[in-house]
Image: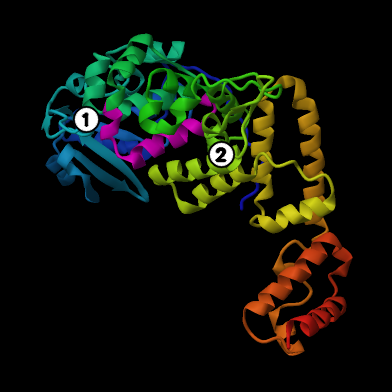
Amino acid sequence: WPPVGELPWRDRKRGGQMREILIPQQVDWILAELEKNGYEAYIVGGCVRDSLLERKPKDWDVTTSARPQDVKRIFRNTYDTGIEHGTVSVRVGTEIYEVTTFRVDGDYSDHRRPDSVEYTDKLAEDLKRRDFTMNAMAYHPRTGLVDLFGGQEDLRTGCIRCVGDPEERFEEDALRMLRAFRFAARFGFQVEEKTKKAVRMKAPLLENVSRERVREEMDQLVCSAYPGILRDVCETGLMAYIIPEWIPCIGAKQNTPYHVYTVEEHMIRAVEAAQPVRVVRWAALLHDIAKPHCRNTDADGRDHFPGHPEQSAQMADKILRGLKFDNVTREAVVLSIRLHDETPPRDLCQMRHLMSRIPDGFYPYLQALERADAAAQNPQYLEASMEKLDVARALYEQVVEEKQCVKLADLAINGRDLMDLGFPKGRMIGEVLQQLLQQVLDYPNMNQKGLLLDIANRLKERMLP
């Protein structure tokens, strides 16, 4: 497992003030070549937005009045990556840039992609089909910014707003509803109320979107700098179509001294408190999702949630499978949830036993979840909880630094040594090694070959006829 370390948070920074955008030389050359052949051309979308926010663009996309066949004629190295929608990829040196013809989209019968596209010679027609005002700006280094829908001002005020009628935009592409909150979580913005109202109206359309695409958007949102936007995802009804198992957690009270928030709010706060590491954030999001199903209330009115870690782990496994997560992430999240409510080890022996049950390098993920969980509980108990976790972390670091035996591979003897003693090849060797490991976990000084062979010999006398 890679180390879980503190990752830097990006400071909230809003932009939108017009200034010169520094375009890569290759992109400027593409624009110039298109112009030289009589066509309009601009950089467009995310690269303009990110540049105005003083962030480094991930991609530089070009929009042009040239038809795809004209783009292929002008540039030598091209690829038909999305030619059915007017997109041709142009390779310049080792870099590849998407060049898309100004277009008008046809109907969206599947609420995801246009059934057809028509080309147009007007940049304005192309811009008004886009999702949000901040993504509907174009720029040319010699003619400046084209901002027809107030994207610059929305960047300045931190507002996510649809181009035109938001209900129409979401009817066209239902994924845009989730993308609105993903952008808000990325930049620390707020979704404009009219746009949010349209999400409430159109939330059921998200069922038309593949689970893989939903996962991609949710993954970026959960791992963002401002995951608290999850509250809006829930409030607008989207969560019912993303993680329907979440719904019983909304408003579910926890009448226990250790909790002052509902189950839903507790889990969102845990995500906010968690390190921005994928496994940790998703484990925080789902770690108590079974609590509403496990609640028992005693005679004093106090709630108890017996078995909720195991049931939450099982539910998380099903949820992550449904969202098409990779196996490594899914298994790590599920294991973290299964173990998150265990009492942290208080001595080296307990730590060695815990480490023997989990994959190598996994404990920092578990502790990161436990810290996020503690931070989202009753603040009255936070200091004591963190002190216990600090002790456990120091114990873990000591076991690792001293290379203490915690796995079969760390034992001073192996299966070959046992066969040399006369043990038959097969299951018995594994059983003996496990017994030896349990003794070494309790008494690490016993991890010496001669000592372990003596113990194995005594075991052989009892186990073999």
Question: Along the horizontal axis of the image, is 228 left or right of 254?
Answer: left
On the image, the x and y values in percent for residue 112 come to 23, 33
User: Mark 2 Cα within 10 Å, few/some/many (few <14, many 20+)?
Assistant: many
Quadrant assignment, res 150: top left
Question: Along the horizontal axis of the image, is 109 left or right of 77?
Answer: left
The span from disc 2 to disc 1 (Cα, nearest Å) is 31 Å
> On residue 283, which mark appears?
2
> On residue 176, which mark appears?
none
**Residue drawn at x 42%, y 46% as measured from the top left:** 321
**Is residue 24 at least partly visible in the picture?**
no
- Residue 217 shown in magenta: yes
**Is residue 121 at least partly visible in the picture?**
yes
User: Mark 1 Cα within 10 Å, few/some/many (few <14, many 20+)?
Assistant: many
Which residues lie in the magenta part? Answer: 205-227
User: What's the residue type where badge 1 is placed?
Assistant: His
Magenta stretch, main secondary structure class: helix
Quadrant assignment, res 443: bottom right
**Mark 2 or 1, nearer chain start:** 1
**Residue drawn at x 69%, y 34% as measured from the top left:** 371
User: What's the residue type where badge 2 is placed?
Assistant: Ala
Label 1: state its secondary structure.
loop
Label 2: state its secondary structure.
helix
Q: Residue furthest front?
A: 299
335 or 68: which is nearer to us?
A: 335
On the image, the x and y values in percent for residue 330 come to 50, 48
On the image, the x and y values in percent for residue 274 come to 62, 32
- Residue 283 shown in magenta: no
Residue hosting label 1 = 111
**Residue drawn at x 60%, y 40% as measured from the top left:** 307
On the image, the x and y values in percent for residue 79 come to 23, 49
